[in-house]
Amino acid sequence: MEQSVRDEILTKLKAAPKAAFPARPHLPPYKTLSMDREQLIAEFITRLTEEAVVVHRAKDFPEALEKLTVVALEEGLKKVMATADDVVLRLDLPAWGKKNDIQIMTPRDFPDRESYRDAVFDQAQAGITGVDFAVAESATIGLIHNQDQARLVSLAPILHIAIVPVDRLVPVYEQVIEKVFGNKKQCPSQFVFISGPSMTGDIQGVLFKGMHGPRKVIVILVG
Amino acid sequence: MEIKTEQFTELAKKELKNDRQRLFLKLIPPVMRMKREAGFSTLPDAPAAMACGAAIRAEAMARLPELLEEFEKNATANGMKVVWARDDKEANEFIRNLAKEKGIQYVTKGKSMVTEETALNEVLEEQGIEVWETDLGEFIAQQLHRTPFHIVGPAINVPVEEVRDLFIEKIGLKEPTLDPVKLGYAARLFLRDKFHHVKMGITGVNMAVAETGTIINVENEGNIRFTKASPPIQVSVMSLEKVIPTMKDALHMVRLLCRSCTGQRLSVYVSMDSGPKKKDEIDGPEELYIVIVDNGRSKIYQDVKAREVLRCIRCGACLAGCPVWRQIGGYAYGWAYSGPMGQVLNPMLLGLDKTQELYRASTLCGACKSICPVGIDHPSLFLYYRSKDVLEDPNFKSKERPWAERQFFRIWSFAASTPWLWNLGVRMARPFINKDARDGIISKAIGPSEGWFRNRDLPSMAGFTFHDRWKKIQNTESRGQKSE
């Protein structure tokens, strides 16, 4: 029966008169495309700051860990959920947690969705993730969701700490899209662009952060 | 929800009496417009970007059947289950049966205009399945049983006092407050519990990319991400015109959508699903259903001019830009879609007979057209609908005009195409038309054209026609030349 509904709709659409459509106009390139690396980083930091994202910059991963320690102290973190992506793995968070008396959970510690949801909704004071991309066009980080990058870690806790290696920063979205969706047989189940903390203006147009997702996003730029 | 598009005039009059709302409508649209303009100024060439948006959507519509097939093929290859529905009933039935079969007690929903159109919530609730709208504005509108006031801020007009009382009653707000931030936080805590345990999530779709079989959702709050990530079953409902050829096109449209909507460079979350979760992923949907809803669109598609309305990406810019919406707000339009967007869409979805006032309640000023990021020419569509209506086109469900009006125009058209009759008429009509003129202005008439003068004036007609004056001048001049 489904098949016939589909065919019926498509047949109807195909029988309709054909129409011409205009050619795409030429679009000038975005200004971030002509920036050198340091300019690009400065632009990205400006955009992040505009969106109320707190930015720390570290020259390498050991320094990033030091920044993370300061953040953990300021935010009073005792229990956090971290993903197991390639960026986070380089930080060796289990060792860092032991040293700083912070319990590190990862989605893999949980046998099923239910227990994982309990932890990420009710116990994690923060979610720590790496990123696959950052885009200087706006205050945007890009995360490919897969077995190492669970979706709720950057969403459910009230604080999201994103570790951003500067070599993953690109000028415009198109470069990200090409890499993530270039081979249509290998598209990730979900890909997300995040630009700042969750927000709303739905009551009388008053803007506030932390509607459903994180109220605060901290970016540690590495490199 | 009851469709009230036939009561437009009545409802508009009522809305005009709401002083608080009118003050709000004076204050907010200029801010929205400023934000929108600031957003567009960050593009290297905003007019070209908008022209490109129009070209992408025009192409998507021209290639609609082919793109839908491509989308379906790729989405299915990625493991999504694509379901087609002829109308609201079929779409709702599929979702209701799925929910029943899976033993679902409640669902969380991301804001979705098409399920607003199909009234899905009522159908689920009849089955005893609780529905929680989770976009803050939509949550408030749902609890108040109202249609969206604005497509982006569905309850943005609701006074804080009303939100406070609502939250005390419905979600057990413990410390009454008038602080929008605290009220929002109370809603966060309440809905968080729903997200935590939800087993089925329902969302809309901003774009469906044919090239990769990907659906894209654009939002600021995170409720759509929760609705897609937390439960094991995801149902995303799209009207069939949402399809876009390529990912690159989609990203360009996202740039335009965010700027047009809220002035942002990018909304906080843009999430793109290309299939259910993989086996070793702990969150995300195990089953992902895409419901493609026609509900009258394949019929609109048959008319090349009317098809233009299917380009709409629901950014809502035309609402705050419209001098009519800025007076009456969104409720008077009587259905899910309000403002110029609703005025071009509702007549096609509901029929010209049920929306008589909608395509006439416009000054044809063209503000909507000038800010539309996909190049919809609203004023020309209003004129098109008006002509289809009076010409009684059965495909558009037009309503018969009053007998007197039809006779008048029959005579008019005969006279206008018969020169001697016309010349006689324009000479004879003058004293009759001018009899009510005061200081060169006609502001009232008695008889069938009385209503026309309710809020309009006409300058009185000159005593002589142009031809008569011209003859007279030439006569005088030729006499003058002779006397020289």
Image (spheres, helix red, strand yellow):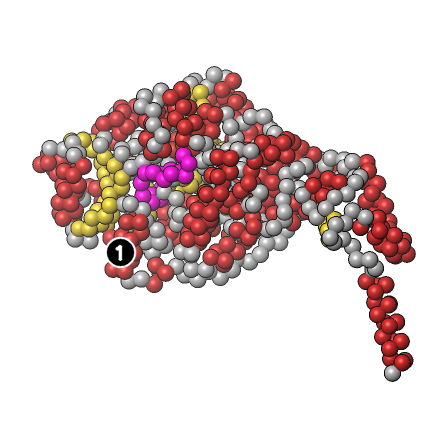
For residue A144, which quarter of the picture?
top left
Q: Mark 1 falls on what kind of element?
A: helix
B280 and A53: which is toward the camera: A53
B474 and A7: which is toward the camera: B474
Q: Say which quadrant the C terminus of chain B sits in.
A: bottom right
Judged left or right of residue A163, residue B35 is right
Which segment did they paint magenta?
A188-209
Does residue B343 appear anywhere in the picture? yes
In the rendered structure, does residue A208 fall within the stretch colored magenta?
A: yes
Q: Which residue was labeled with disc 1?
A: A41
Residue at position x 50%, y 17% in the image: B127
Q: Say which quadrant the N terminus of chain B sits in.
A: top right
- What chain does badge 1 belong to? A
Q: Residues within 10 Å of mark 1 (few under 14, many from 20)?
A: many
Residue A74 percent coordinates (x, y): 16, 39
Judged left or right of residue B143, residue B89 is right
Judged left or right of residue B240, residue B167 is left
Q: Amino acid at mark 1?
A: Ile
Residue B114 percent coordinates (x, y): 53, 34
Q: Is residue A138 above or below residue A95?
A: below
Residue at position x 32%, y 38% in the image: A209
Residue at position x 19%, y 51% in the image: A57
